[in-house]
Structure formats: C-alpha cells, structure tokens
Amino acid sequence: MRNLKMTVSYDGSEFNGFQAQPIGRTVQGELERAIRSIVGHEVKIIGSGRTDAGVHAYGQVFNFLTHMTIPVERWPFALNTKLPDGIIIRSAEEVNLEFHARHFSKRKIYRYAICNSQYSNVFRRKYEFHISRYLDFEAMSEAAKYLVGTYDFTSFRSTRSTVRNHVRTIYRSEWVRDGETVYYYVEGDGFLYNMVRIIIGTMIQIGDGKKSAASMPSILAAMDRNAAGPTAPAHGLTLWQVMY
Amino acid sequence: MRNLKMTVSYDGSEFNGFQAQPIGRTVQGELERAIRSIVGHEVKIIGSGRTDAGVHAYGQVFNFLTHMTIPVERWPFALNTKLPDGIIIRSAEEVNLEFHARHFSKRKIYRYAICNSQYSNVFRRKYEFHISRYLDFEAMSEAAKYLVGTYDFTSFRSTRSTVRNHVRTIYRSEWVRDGETVYYYVEGDGFLYNMVRIIIGTMIQIGDGKKSAASMPSILAAMDRNAAGPTAPAHGLTLWQVMY
C-alpha cells in the first residue's frame, strides 16, 4: 500500500466547493472520479480541509492510499488527462502511511484579491473582488497587523461554524499591492469557517472609513460575530498553500 | 449628433468572435444590444477590426454615432451594467464626426501568451497557450527580430485571406519573460488574417529546433503560406492596443 500526497490547483468558479456532496460537481468528486478511472475502484481522498463554493485553490493538498505501482512522478500527468481543465494536479509525492492531509497540516496561507480600479479586469474578474470606490489601504494595512498573534477569533467566524475552540494563531497578515490589484496574505495554524472572508469584510469597512484600524483589538475582544464586518464574496479568495 | 469612441476589453473564450454574425453570441452583437437598450433604437458600431473566435482583447476600440446627450464619462458605467461580465468598457471619449475606428487606426499591438511550464496555470488557462516541453527562447527572440521592418507577409497570412496587399510594417517584435509565462508583443501598421498566430506557430517550431531563427528571412521571401509554421491556437492571443 502506498500513500500519495498531491498538490492541486482549481478554479472555484467552476465547482460547487471542494467537498464531495450529493448535489453539484465538486473538486473532491472530480478528483475521486479521475483516480477511480485509473485504479479501477472507489477511492476516498483526504483534503487538507474544505473550501467553500466559489473559493479557489492554488496549492490545496490531499492524500489517498493505493495499491497502484505507477511511478509517483507520472501521477499528475495521468490524472490531469482525466480531470476537467479547471482542476490541475501540480505535484505528487509518496509519503509515510500515517500521513493525513488534514490532521498533519501545520499552517495554511490564504490570499484574497481585490481589484481596486474603476472597472474590473476582464481576465481576472472570476478571481478578484472588484471595488471601484477609494479604499484607504494604509488603514487596512494597519488593521491587518493587529491580527498577528494568538487570539480567540469568535468575532470572525460564521455563526454556522460548529467547532468549539475558536483560538487560532496568525503568523502573517498583510496587504501587498500589485498595480490595481491588492492582495491580502494571511498565514495561520488554522482558520474558522468564513474567517478570512469576514476579516476581509471588516477590513473593507476600515478602508471605507466606517471603522477605524485601531478598532481591530476591540472587535477581537468582543467575541461576537456582530462586532465584525460582512462576509466578503468567495470569488476573491484562494487557498494559497498548505504547510506540513 | 455625437461620435463616441470607446475602448473595450473582452474575454474571447465566451464569444464567437468580435464581428456580428447570424449565429452565436459575438462581442459586437452584445455591444450593439447594450447600446440599443440605452438609446432605444438600432445602432451599428464600427470596430478597429475583427478578432477571430477565441481571441481576446484588452484594448479593442470602436465608435458609433448617437443623438444621446448622456455625458461621455457616464457611458462606460451605463453600458457595463447592460453587458455580460466578459465584456468591459474601459473608457469613452467624444471624437470628431469623421473619426472611424477602422479607417483611422494607425498601429495595433497584439500580445501572445505561452505558459511554458510542466502544468498550465489554472487561473490563466483560457488566456495562455500551454506548452510543457522545453522551448529555446533565445532562438525565438532572435527570430522575432527579423520581422521588424516593411515586408510582404504572404507567407504569414491565412490562404482564406482576401486582401490583395500583403505588405505590412512591423515596429516591434519581441518576447518578454514573466516567470513561467512568455509574452510575444508585436506592433504593426496592420495585420493580415491569422498573421500573428502563424508567426507564433513558426516561432514555436524555431523554439522546438525544427527551424532555425535564421530561416525567418527565407520564410518571408518565399511568399508561400507553406513555408511558415502552423497557426497557433486563438486563446493565447490578445488584441492589446489600437493607436490613432
């Protein structure tokens, strides 16, 4: 038995989220279908975590067990020929049998993209949230810094979240400008349901002058979803990297 | 009567070319439908030229005549709300009544994108031609230089082309690398049918070592479509800018 770990990119606009579910085409469903067509039987993959409908991935990671002895370096090409073009396996490696893509993940990086120009970029419209009005990025950059550290992120989690422990550690939280697009990178040991999108919705309010950057600590301290801003749209968000 | 000149971006993967035709959704058809919904009657727009099915535009230009007195700076926003999201008007200005987007165009710039990496980039797959094998970009860059000047481009035009004069002047012809993507920029006083795509197909043969860079002058001199390489796929090509 071999345990294969793979890195996959996908265009979230073409799938109904990562996790397999009864209705709609999902990334996990497409991956399992492609693997099945190679190994000849049902296979269950383990993702590093789910991504919501509309959220993209550059470096999502998953693993699965197989008896197939195809050399590991041939797997990406073999699977890519069976996958829809919105999903691309970028690498594969054999790992210890105990490796588990969700349990072993140590840190994740998410990236959120905002196109802050008068009109959206037609070639990136599915991957960037377009905001034509002025945003105060200095204030947003200042706000971002307050999130680095270990905090209870209850204010920044969907009330539909069912996990009990809301304490997470954030190692990096910053905005980077590239022309008319501004990217928010956030690296943490884990993220609550909708956490990055609520952080973004809150920072957009700060960019709009509706909240001050200095209000971030009190929003965290409130431990109340109503203290934060709205949930930003899914299509600006990309699961960038998963670290083990 | 006012003559409005507009710059438009579009995602060629979602339309059946620029020019209005009986079958399929075209960029011109969508623009004329959107303008009609604002002015209340049929309008015929004049594009700087057609783009083939699958070819994108960053800066296509068109003009049309209207009696509407909406301030010119409001037109892009008004039209964008009526257009599908794969078409974005980027700017509008009022020009002299004699201005004609096709007849007055002096130069055009096209850009062709090749993703030269093992796997394609999922977020740019519709705008880049993916080639995983090694390409000799030094040879391709050398080949590109031979096209600068005034030449008869008969070898680089589709045999379905009906224009008689095949002499065109090229002002810029060069490859620019940006990470795993390489862009070819070509600026000229005009382009024959499929000309850029045949230039690319020929340069890919040079990158593959099937032809030498130094063979470009003899390919031009042959004035025979068979002397050049195949027509590269449409989806890597973008009409970048039209100059007046």
Image (tube, coloured by chain):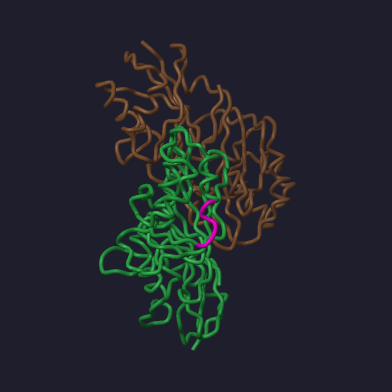
Chain colours: A brown, B green
Q: Nearer the viewer, residue A90 or B52?
A: B52
Say which residue appears at 50% left-offset and 51% top-offset: A124
Q: Nearer the viewer, residue A14 or B89?
A: B89
Q: Nearer the viewer, residue A224 or B10?
A: B10
B158 vs B32: above or below: above
A13 vs B76: above or below: above
Q: Nearer the viewer, residue A129 or B46?
A: B46
Q: Is residue A170 left or right of residue A77?
A: right
Residue A84 image offset from top left, x and y in percent? 34, 39
The residues colored magenta run: B146-150
* In magenta segment, residue A224: no
Q: Is residue A219 left or right of residue B76?
A: right
Residue A137 image offset from top left, x and y in percent? 69, 52
B148 vs B104: above or below: above
Say which residue appears at 54% left-offset and 73% top-offset: B92
Q: Is residue B199 left or right of residue A205?
A: left
Residue A183 image offset from top left, x and y in percent? 61, 45
Quadrant of the rendered structure where residue B16 is? bottom left
Q: Residue furthest bottom?
A: B1
Q: Main secondary structure of the magenta part?
A: loop
* Number of marks in the rendered image: 0
Q: Is residue B80 visible?
A: yes
Q: Is residue B12 visible?
A: no
Residue B85 image offset from top left, x and y in percent? 43, 60
* In magenta segment, residue B149: yes
Quadrant of the rendered structure where residue B178 is? top right
Say which residue appears at 69% left-offset and 49% top-offset: A140
